[in-house]
Image (spheres, grey):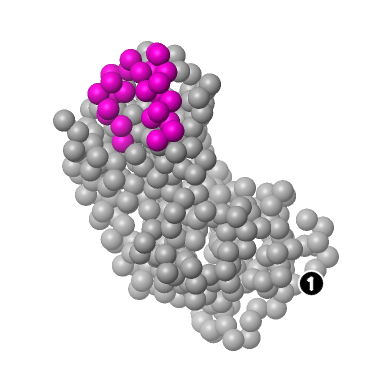
Amino acid sequence: MNLLKALIPLALSTSAAMADAVTVSNCGTDHSYDTVPTRAITLNQQATEVMLALGLEGSMVGTAYLDDAIPTQWKDAYDSVPVLAEKYPAAEVVLAEEPDFLFAGFGSAFSEDNMGAAQKWHDLGVGTYLVDASCKTYHPKNVPLTIEPILKDIEVIGDIFHVEDRADTLIAETKARIDAVGNNPAGAGRSAFIYDSGTDTPYSIGCCGGPALVAKTAGLNSISADVEGTWVDLAWEKVVATDPQVIVLIEADWSTAAEKREYMEQDPVLSELTAVKEGKFVIVPFSETLLGMRFADGVETVNAQLAAMK
């Protein structure tokens, strides 16, 4: 990232709307916004959907890194924003867009292999924000998440872009939807194996990330709730030994729900699991397991499928 050090700070657009300064502390760095950003770039789908839900696509000059399909309600807005890369764009590509704000969903965006440290961008006059749930400083791997991080993200982005009223409305709606599921969980008392990917070793969830909170909110007892972390490697022996009542399949581009179900149904041992024999599968898109704008969709989706099970 020597290129970043060599470049002079980028001037913010003179057409940016003037507003009261906003100072944001985010995962160990502080940055002040004297003007509302007008050239924002989102680096992960989780961040992109926060911007779209707040109606801020007009303030974006680029986006990147989808995990699955953009929901219908935001598709037109998303299509109006240039896609800079399939995964993370090169720093040079980002710099060419003269951004004034970079918004990431995962800490990997600000690694040296990708965008470089957030402070380097701040030194160039470019604000950054990493979604609260992805900051390990705030959320150790052994402490279960609550829904507060996504509510905080909406509030902070609303403050930075001075759309506080929209943010307040979205916070209230999001919290109400999640609370409604938590107050009437259809999976209460059922044990569950959450299956992300892998065949030799199943990649599943640990105790403390967004996926675990989806399961917990819907009343499920994850068979790996005693394992630290967000995503973890399990052993098939553990899955067989616990014989979960429900199997939650994560739908993702890199490992579809159909592929995982077919693998389990064709395996001579896994096919004997009660949930497999009875077809007790629940499907949830990867983006709906993250503490982002689709988290409420995720808990509603899982809860509805559980409620439909006999």
Give 283 or 154, whichever is nearer the viewer: 283
Residue displayed at 37% across by 50% down: 295
Rendered location of residue 46, percent (x, y): 48, 54
Q: Dot 1 lies on which element?
A: loop
Q: Quadrant of residue 276?
A: top left
Q: Main secondary structure of the magenta part?
A: helix
Name the residue located 51 percent from the left edge and 82 percent from the top edge: 19
Q: Report the front residue among 165 and 285.
A: 285
Residue depicted at x 19% and y 38%: 307
Image quarter hosting the C terminus:
top left
Residue occupied by mark 1: 8
Q: Is residue 32 left or right of residue 131?
A: right
In the image, farthest residue toward the left: 310
In this view of the protein, can residue 196 be seen by the observer? yes
Mark 1 crowd level (few <14, some 14–19, many ≥20, 10 Å Cα): few
Which of the image's four quarters has the N terminus?
A: bottom right
Q: Residue furthest bottom?
A: 15
Image quadrant assignment for residue 267: top left
Q: Which residue does the image show at 19% across and 33% down from the upper left?
A: 309
- Pick whichever, 201 or 170, lies toward us: 201
Q: Image quadrant of residue 31?
A: bottom right
Task: Establish if 277 lies above or below 54.
Answer: above
Does the stretch in magenta take in 207? no
Q: Give x and y (percent) for residue 90.
A: 71, 58
Residue 43 against residue 18 in the figure, above or below: above
Q: Is residue 271 magenta?
A: yes
Residue 7 percent location from the top left of the image: 80, 68
The residue range painted magenta reads 258-282
**Residue 44 appears left or right of 209:** right
Instruction: Give percent across and percent down for residue 30.
Output: 61, 62
Amino acid type assigned to the residue bearing label 1 in the image: Ile
